[in-house]
Amino acid sequence: MKIHVLLRFYEELNDFLSIEKRKREFTARSDDSTTVKHLIESLGIPHCEVDLILVNGRSVSFSYVLKNSDRISVYPKFESFDISTISKLRGIPLRNPLFILDVHLGRLAGFLRLLGFDARYRNDYSDIQIVRLSLEEGRTILTRDRELLKIKQVTRGYWVRSVDPETQLKEVIRRFELTTLINPFSICLTCNSQLEKIDKKKIRGKISPKTYAQYNEFSICGGCGKIYWKGSHYRSMIRFISENGYI
Ligand SMILES: [Zn+2]
């Protein structure tokens, strides 16, 4: 049987809707066996963008089956207050955020690593690999491809709105409230492993004598063995970080 429901989407969820549906209540036709999740996705909104669904004023899960005349409000992640006591969609907030980025977001991955965030990225990952790693390692998928987020198994994901890498970084920092977790130069920019401080004597012969003489503090990547020191590259990155207000 066909039914009618009233829908309204809030805040940035409107980014996914056609203009006539944005920021206003509208009517949608559906079958009476359809879940609210299916309806939301059929309108182009990946389920992992949604944090709270109210039907006739009550919080419901994605598996809620629609009834005629339901009035549905759909909210994205709230920026300003904790909804964990009322939302049925997500248990605990993400604490130690881990990311995996699709093949088009290499520069964003580099920026996230620079700020100390674990951001898995390879330019040859398939969609299936990205989803699998996301599930196995509890990583949030960052992507510009909405279709990737509509894959049923995806539980954590975010559609990056901007196309400019520096703006993307700001967007992700804001969306996931990462400001207090920024810890620059703790992750290898090349392979995404943790950096560890290393005694200068242990790396004698592995770097140029000039660098060895000039610097005293070194870190080494636990994954690929790359050695880091606070040279001109480090200073230019610090400038980038501070100019953007990250530290
Ligand atoms: Zn490395």
Image (cartoon, grey):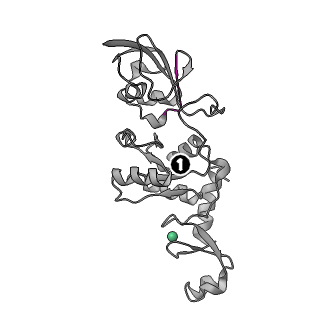
Q: Position of residue 126 (x, y in %)?
A: 33, 54
Identify the residue position indicated by label 1 in the image. 169
> 102 above or below 4?
below
Q: Residue at x 40, y 41 (%)?
A: 149
Vertical placement of 105 versus 144: above or below?
below
Q: Is residue 95 left or right of residue 27?
A: right
Dividing the picture into quarters, in which one does residue 186 lie? bottom right
Q: Position of residue 223 (x, y in %)?
A: 51, 71
Task: Give the residue type that dot 1 points to.
Answer: Leu
Q: Nearer the viewer, residue 91 or 223?
A: 91
Farthest residue, direction left: 1
- For residue 24, say whether it is visible: no
Residues packed near mark 1 inside 10 Å, few (<14), some (14 to 19) or many (20 plus) = many
Q: Classify mark 1: helix, strand or loop.
A: helix
Query: Residue at left 59%, top 59%?
Result: 116
Q: Nearer the viewer, residue 15 or 69?
A: 69
Residue 201 image position (x, y, % from top left): 65, 87
Task: Confirm whether residue 144 shows in the render.
Answer: yes
Apparent side of residue 124 relative to residue 240 in the rendered image (left or right): left
| Magenta span: chief secondary structure | strand
Quadrant of the rendered structure where residue 34 is? top left
- Does the magenta run of residues contain 54? yes
Magenta-highlighted residues? 50-55
189 or 5, which is in the foreground?
5
Position of residue 177 in the picture relative to residue 50 (left or right): right
Quarter the N terminus occupies: top left
